[in-house]
């Protein structure tokens, strides 16, 4: 890093360490990695909508998925100084209870070791053994705190099987808060396939990826708000993928619906002590800047704060369709959005890296 | 209207004309109106999530639902000069084929007559007999054009049963375009109940109303874009309820997912002639300003244009929970958002009424 340039940090960038690739190759239903004869190329299929004959099945698994040198190469091409890598979805959601703790340890150790190979350039979010039971989860949170490059955990929307508004998850959020580890909330399951209609197969992966993912995140975090998680763990820090799904745009409507709900009023859930959606956005939530437009990013900044948005790429997803491209359009679009919303000067430094360095203690 | 004040137009305001109330009272499953003993008060139940013992069942049906004098009183209280009234969801989606044409005629005539009682203050969006077959729909579109106060149609997301990306709906969109009637797209069905989780009953109506509605609209219009409706009927004019659901915020992501989709590329659907999501937002779409926040409204304005957003209230829904309130907080919130985004001067005149007067020819 030169002294004159502010550091750029990518907080939304995924890895498939070799032990995770092995786990996926051992499976015969989604999520899985396999070849589809006559081709011998390995393909990764992670979404139900991808697992049909009518669309390209999954995506090719190239070195950019598992080789950390490819991550560094990608960072260099895109002027990224630091990446906070995280295991890609669906993490360990599907691992049997008695294998979860070991799988999480192995993967977290492996990810931490990869960071070690490039000191100062890589940090990571860990993965919890959610199916392994409360003791295994608590144990892994403590262990993660001891791993040098871990700076939080990545979490899907399933929780222990009942979503993130499950009361049994509150101790997990409390434990994460106690060790000052933020939660990077990331979607995976999207929405039930019926909502995309009969013609969904014609639209490739667009509907589940463009809409299913952000809507899943929005629903998950709204359920957390309604269940009172942010009153019970007032210091909980969440980083929401894809600029919060749609939370910045819908915050006003959610808040209005809460304030006009006769049931919530009758239950005494309005009024004193309630954190509004805006309170949560400004005190508990950080947003990545992976929203692909200035319109979206400005809404994210207005909703949460200029000091609470963080650049990201979603690498290795959304590569260029044309192989000859060296810079990825998906990444450039997010750079352009930051420049559009915050300018090219000092005001953009926080979103580009300063916020992540401060919040995740990357110095 | 005084000469010094710019007119205020409410384009999102619903009515339940007496003939529609009668239709709903004749039913025994949602949507329906009935009393729940021991109370004799009539209640309207329109959403599956409302039809359970665990939440207040539906909502009381007061005069504000069916008495047009109450609409005028509400307009006067909130400084609204003109309202463009529309039948509330779920319209005639559930009416048997042989009754649809007659029901639509009766309701449209009745709504037009109500406008006649207050010349210059009321206009309307008509309702199509979607279950009545192509001839009935075409016939009613022509008839609507002849009704003095009709300025477009309100449409749900079901279409002819297969959604708005159904190729059989293209002639309907073409016919509406030919008579220059915009489509006011409005949600009703939300999302499958499973996405709200086990605790949904504790949260009143918040999740289906705050998230289900806007997400349904977003999905519907994205399916229209992907199916090529806006290339086939390039002049089609849509007004999207609730500031487009979440379309302004997600437009960048949708556009990025389209541009990175290998299936769409292989099918030759990228490149030449394709309208981008942004093209559609700026050429085919108008957005109401019913988004309850400055953050959301600014995104709507940036995405579609200052000359394409239109004030609305969603009356008679979201009344104050405290009876003594004379002005409705839900309405004031949307006024404040307009003032915040556009100021109190001339710049706000379009959003407050000028745009609606121009686009819907209300002069």
Image: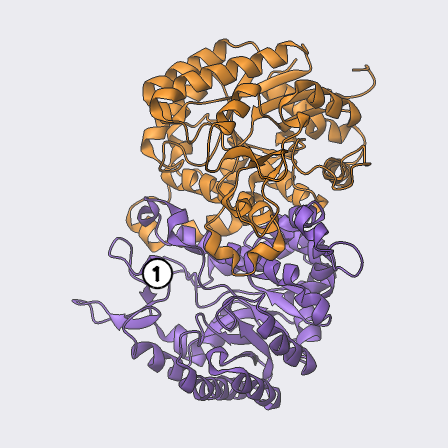
Chain colours: A purple, B orange
The residue nearer to you, when weighing A110 against B336, is: B336
Quadrant location of the N terminus of chain B? Answer: top right
Task: Answer with left or right where residue A300 lies relative to residue B151.
Answer: right
How many numbered discs?
1
The residue nearer to you, when weighing A142 against A17, is: A142
Give how far across and how far down residue B109 sits, in percent. Answer: 52, 13
Q: Quadrant of residue A229?
A: bottom right
Label 1 crowding class (10 Å Cα cut-off): few <14, some 14-19, many 20+? some
Give how far across and how far down residue B50 sits, in percent. Answer: 55, 45
- The reply to whether residue B345 is visible in this rendering is yes
- In the image, residue B290 above or below residue A264: above
Farthest residue to the left: give it.
A38
Q: Which residue does the numbered mark 1 point to in the structure image?
A: A48
- In the image, residue B255 above or below residue B186: below
Give how far across and how far down residue A115 sits, in percent. Answer: 53, 84
The residue nearer to you, when weighing B200 against A336, is: B200
Quadrant location of the C terminus of chain B? Answer: top right
- The reply to whether residue A294 is visible in this rendering is no
Who's the residue at 49% across and 77% down the image?
Answer: A72
- In the image, residue A240 above or below residue B362: below
Say which chain tag 1 marks: A
Give how far across and how far down residue B301 sits, in percent. Answer: 64, 38
Task: Answer with left or right where residue B70 lies relative to residue B286.
Answer: right
Who's the residue at 43% across and 28% down the image?
Answer: B234
Who's the residue at 74% across and 64% down the image?
Answer: A283
Q: Quadrant of residue B102?
A: top left
- Helix, strand or loop at mark 1: helix
């Amino acid at each position: 890093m030169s002294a004159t340039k502010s550091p750029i940090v990518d907080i939304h960038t995924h890895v498939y360490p070799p032990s995770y690739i092995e786990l996926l190759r051992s499976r015969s239903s989604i999520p899985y990695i396999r070849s589809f004869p006559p081709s011998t190329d390995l393909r990764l299929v992670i979404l139900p909508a991808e697992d049909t004959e009518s669309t390209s099945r999954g995506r090719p698994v190239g070195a950019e998925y598992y080789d950390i040198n490819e991550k560094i190469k990608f960072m260099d091409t895109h002027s990224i100084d630091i990446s906070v890598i995280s295991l890609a979805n669906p993490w360990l959601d599907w691992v049997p209870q008695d294998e979860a703790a070991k799988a999480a340890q192995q993967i977290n150790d492996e990810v931490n070791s990869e960071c070690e190979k490039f000191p100062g350039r890589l940090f990571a979010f860990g993965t919890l053994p959610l199916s392994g039971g409360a003791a295994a989860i608590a144990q892994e949170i403590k262990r993660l705190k001891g791993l040098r490059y871990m700076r939080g955990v990545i979490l899907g929307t399933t929780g222990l099987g009942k979503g993130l508004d499950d009361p049994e998850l509150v101790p997990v959020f409390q434990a994460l808060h106690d060790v000052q580890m933020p939660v990077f909330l990331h979607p995976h399951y999207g929405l039930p396939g019926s909502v995309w209609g009969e013609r969904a197969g014609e639209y490739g992966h667009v509907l589940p990826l463009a809409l299913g993912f952000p809507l899943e995140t929005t629903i998950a975090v709204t359920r957390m708000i309604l269940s009172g998680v942010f009153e019970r763990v007032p210091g909980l820090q969440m980083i929401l993928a894809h600029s919060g799904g749609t939370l910045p745009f819908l915050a006003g409507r959610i808040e209005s619906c809460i304030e006009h709900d006769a049931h919530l009023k009758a239950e005494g859930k309005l009024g004193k002590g309630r954190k509004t959606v805006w309170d949560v956005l400004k005190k508990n939530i950080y947003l990545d800047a992976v929203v692909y437009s200035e319109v979206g990013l400005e809404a994210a900044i207005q909703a949460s704060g200029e000091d609470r948005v963080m650049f990201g790429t979603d690498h290795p997803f959304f590569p260029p369709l044309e192989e000859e491209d060296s810079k990825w359009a998906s990444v450039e679009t997010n750079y352009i959005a930051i420049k559009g919303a915050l300018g090219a000067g000092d005001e953009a430094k926080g979103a580009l890296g300063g916020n992540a360095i401060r919040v995740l203690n990357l110095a």
